[in-house]
Image (tube, rainbow, N blue to C red):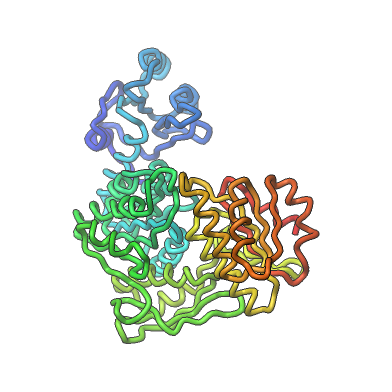
Amino acid sequence: MESISTKEILSWTKSKLISGSPDSVVSNFSTDSRITVSDDFFIPIKGENYDGHVFIVDALKTGVKGFVYDSNYDDKKNLVSFANRNYPSVLILESGDTVEFLGNVAKGYLKKFKAKSIGITGSAGKTSTKNFLVNILKKVSNTVFTKKNYNNEIGIPKTIFDVNKDTMYFIAELGMRAKGQIARLSEICNLNYGIITGIGPSHLEFFKNIDEIALAKAEIGKTINESKGILFLNGDDAYADLVEKNVKCKVLKCGKGNGFKYNFSNCKNDKFAVYSFDLNYYDKKITRIGLNIPGYHNVYNALLAASTALYFGVEPEKIKDAIGETTSEALRMEIIEKEGKLILNDCYNANPLSLKSAVDSLSIIAKNQKRRSVAIIGDMLELGRASKEMHEEIGHYLAVKEIDVLIALGEKSAGICGKFSQSVKPCKEIHYFKKKEHLLLEIEKIIKSGDAVLIKGSRANKMENIIDYI
């Protein structure tokens, strides 16, 4: 990051200078005392199971330039006394919530530069859409983007500090678990543009219904409107109209058919459920794009990234090349061939929307390659009161897609088995395991050479190690 002054930090955060000079500068921030180095400014984070304030002394021993503490921290007087006595030149600030402090510093820092800020959210497809767009814009200019799971109030600010005067684009994946989070992350990112990939029943534990999820995602529009930017929507998504009605910013819908400004047509798939399609401007073909990742849903993810890039004036051939070069991330729609079996590893996470998309790919692969289709499905978490209904819905969907073998894992997935057995005619092969260790003992007997196998479940299930036993 480029250095910022203490005066700027005080202005952005409304914090209080306790010790040190207001004319000092900060060139790096750290939230982990284990990797803090000399001259870092330490920000202690309070989590569910820990309080970063207890590591401030450890950070001081590494030679940090300074630290901030929460004004409500119980031992703040002793902490300040110890620091002033042993580290008299250290910069000490008092603030409110330290996570909010980190976000406000990042927000102020990003405003110092001219980078176009783009936020991507949705119930599924955020990471794939981000990867498509990143690969496109990297061909044009310096691009900074969130990596791994840096999609929250801590990870996004840390990424923002990578921005400098040479950065043309900043791209952030925006995660959400509750109301108000998308609004806060959008504010931190000073968003100029946004993308919503689609709305589905994820995190229903924290919402009454899917409408509430859509409205929470729509919070992204407030900051975009203030910057007079544009929100790109999957126009074929069932909740696109609801989102559009509840945002004040300009909306550009993209989808299938020439009713949309940017759209796709002539969509075809290969034996691995990898698609190609025509990218169009209304009824005029711009170019043909071939994906390198399986799944029909990725056509929409690629379209949203391409539409955003076209709006920015990126050349169609660069868009085509970049999308074609984008590959699957670990645990996301990875195709693995093992001893005659074809495994679709999509274990990163699961909700009804993403699970149905994965089942679609399994069905296509199995039919195109004349393989037996096997779905290994784990519990979907954070669905709240709708959990039983949603798991049963997946059971019915598996039957509609004519999946040959269902292997269900976990207490909640019993509902998948029940509905699947009721829906298929004649009855298909069903295996249910409450615990993973029992599944691992039997899996080799169930899976056969030549099978197409989908493995899908919520992250807490860590289902990827099942691959070792197939």
Residue at left 42%, top 33%? 39
Depicted 210 relative to depicted 88: above or below: below
Residue at left 62%, top 45%? 411
Residue at left 32%, top 86%? 284
Q: Quadrant of residue 400?
A: bottom right
Depicted 64 relative to depicted 276: above or below: above
Q: Quadrant of residue 258?
A: bottom left
Q: Nearer the viewer, residue 60 or 75?
A: 75
Left or right of residue 401, residue 442 in this image: right
Q: Nearer the viewer, residue 110 or 20?
A: 110
Q: Residue 180 in the image: state x and y as whole percent.
A: 31, 44
Left or right of residue 337, residue 329 in this image: left
Quadrant housing the C terminus: bottom right
Is residue 218 among the parts visible in the rendering?
A: yes
Left or right of residue 205, residue 220 in this image: left
Q: Nearer the viewer, residue 21 or 234?
A: 234
Q: Residue 234 in the image: state x and y as whole percent.
A: 35, 67
